Image (tube, rainbow, N blue to C red):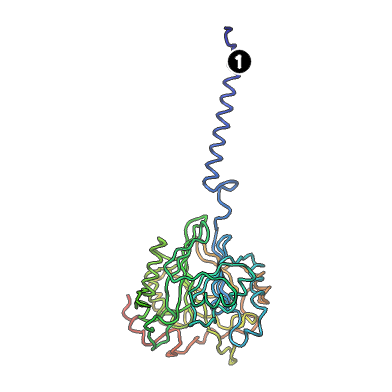
């Protein structure tokens, strides 16, 4: 056998080194893909923020990366509904103009089969194909309108995407000052806790469309022999299920007794931001003229924390919690691990005939005048709840 030449040995050595480099590159690439990488090193489907919009009454939309969730759909109220049959499409198109999608729809409460908060849900579903979650009575109404709906009771864990999980919880509807919760829990109401794994960390927030005032928030409800828990207890259970100990953002409302709602939930939620929705209800007096909820006219009431002396008193014990409201319909806010800040939403607003910023086009109430007078049974503060605030903490 002839001896192996030195040139051949060097050729073999170079080949081995080249193959090792290829293998290392392949392994590194595989690891990058496994971590959701490529290019920037992150999964393009992972949300960077939650974009929140409120547009009157109890209508909310959140865009969580590529997942869009619509809460409630009531774009005209009462007699105005039939006169504004084109509003659902206009709202859907306006949201899309601003980059939003509607992949899921959820309902906050149902007034004993009356669809005042879901009247436009079937049409929105026809326009978008969104999956709809609601309480059983609302689902029955939706199916009667040829819409599909998945019934929920609260306590479920629903994955909306790889990065977004929703935890519905049994809630209660707002209770007027002087009234008490019905034995069966009254109007069936569900709140929604969201946990989102963003590119910079986890954020958690709630969407609710109803006030929960007074001691009834801690009252357990038994329906058909089944203990459905209390609003506060169910909320805490949802947080435990999600594995979160505080919220980055919490919606409150409606205007009814929301100071006591905050008293019931702030200690458990410890939110960075409280956001008031449904403010002003469906009608109110603006500069001596009664104006109702009208998406095309702009927000007629801009609430202020000073509407509620009880809330002002309570927030002294929660200095890290910021109170926020919208100035107009379709005001947008960005929620990230860094905070909750307003962002431009000019395209959507223009599509709805609203100014890019500020109130309008119709006048807004004088914010120096309290939203509801003290003692109003449907007011933001209930005098009967004063001892609760006096005893806190």
| Residue 47 point in image, percent of width and height | 55, 58
Please give the name of the residue rendered at 51% of the width and 87% of the height, measured from the top-left corner.
Answer: 369
Please give the name of the residue rendered at 57% of the width and 7% of the height, measured from the top-left corner.
Answer: 1
**Number of numbered discs visible in the structure rendering:** 1
Q: Residue furthest bottom?
A: 288
* Label 1 crowd (10 A; few <14 / some 14-19 / many >=20): few
| Residue 226 point in image, percent of width and height | 35, 74
Question: In the picture, residue 272 is in which quadrant?
Answer: bottom left
Q: Which one is nearer the viewer's eye here, 370 or 67?
A: 67
| Residue 328 point in image, percent of width and height | 59, 77
Q: Which one is nearer the viewer's eye here, 305 or 387?
A: 387
Question: In the picture, residue 296 is in which quadrant?
Answer: bottom right
| Residue 225 point in image, percent of width and height | 34, 76
Residue at mark 1: 8
Judging from the image, what secondary structure is the residue with disc 1 in? Answer: helix
Please give the name of the residue rendered at 54% of the width and 72% of the height, measured from the top-left corner.
Answer: 71
Q: Quadrant of the C terminus?
A: bottom left
Please give the name of the residue rendered at 54% of the width and 48% of the height, measured from the top-left corner.
Answer: 36
């Amino acid at each position: 056998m002839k001896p192996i030449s030195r040139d051949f040995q060097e050729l073999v050595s170079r080949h081995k080194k080249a193959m090792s480099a290829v293998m290392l590159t392949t392994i590194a690439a595989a690891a990058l893909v496994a971590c959701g990488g490529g290019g920037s090193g992150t999964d393009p489907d992972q949300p960077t923020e939650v974009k929140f919009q409120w547009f009157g009454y109890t209508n909310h939309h959140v865009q969580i990366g590529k997942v869009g969730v619509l809460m409630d759909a009531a774009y005209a109220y009462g007699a105005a509904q039939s006169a504004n049959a084109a509003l659902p499409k206009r709202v859907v198109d306006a949201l899309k103009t601003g980059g939003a999608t509607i992949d899921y729809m959820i309902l906050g409460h149902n007034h004993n089969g009356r669809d005042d908060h879901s009247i436009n849900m079937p049409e929105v579903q026809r326009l978008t194909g969104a999956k709809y979650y609601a309480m059983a009575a609302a689902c029955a109404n939706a199916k009667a309108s040829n819409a599909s709906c998945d019934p929920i009771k609260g306590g479920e864990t629903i994955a909306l995407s790889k990065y977004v999980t929703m935890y519905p919880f049994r809630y209660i509807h707002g209770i007027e000052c002087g009234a008490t919760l019905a034995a069966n829990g009254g109007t069936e109401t569900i709140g929604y806790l969201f946990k989102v794994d963003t590119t910079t960390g986890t954020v958690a927030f709630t969407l609710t469309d109803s006030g929960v005032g007074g001691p009834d928030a801690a009252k357990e409800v038994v329906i058909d022999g089944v203990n459905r828990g209390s609003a506060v207890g169910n909320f805490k259970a949802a947080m435990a299920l999600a594995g979160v100990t505080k919220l980055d953002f919490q919606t409150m409302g409606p205007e009814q007794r929301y100071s006591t709602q905050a008293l019931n939930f702030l200690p458990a939620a410890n939110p960075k931001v409280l956001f008031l929705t449904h403010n002003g209800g469906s009608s109110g007096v603006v500069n001596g003229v009664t104006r109702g909820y009208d998406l095309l006219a702009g927000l007629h009431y801009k609430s202020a924390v000073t509407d509620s002396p009880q809330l002002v008193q309570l927030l002294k014990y929660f200095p890290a919690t910021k109170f926020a409201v919208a100035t107009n319909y379709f005001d947008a806010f960005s929620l990230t691990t860094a905070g909750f800040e307003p962002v431009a939403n000019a395209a959507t607003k223009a599509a709805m005939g609203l100014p890019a910023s500020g109130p309008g086009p119709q006048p807004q109430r004088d914010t120096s005048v309290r939203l509801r007078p003290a003692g109003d049974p449907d007011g933001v503060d209930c005098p009967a709840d004063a001892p609760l605030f006096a005893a806190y903490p």
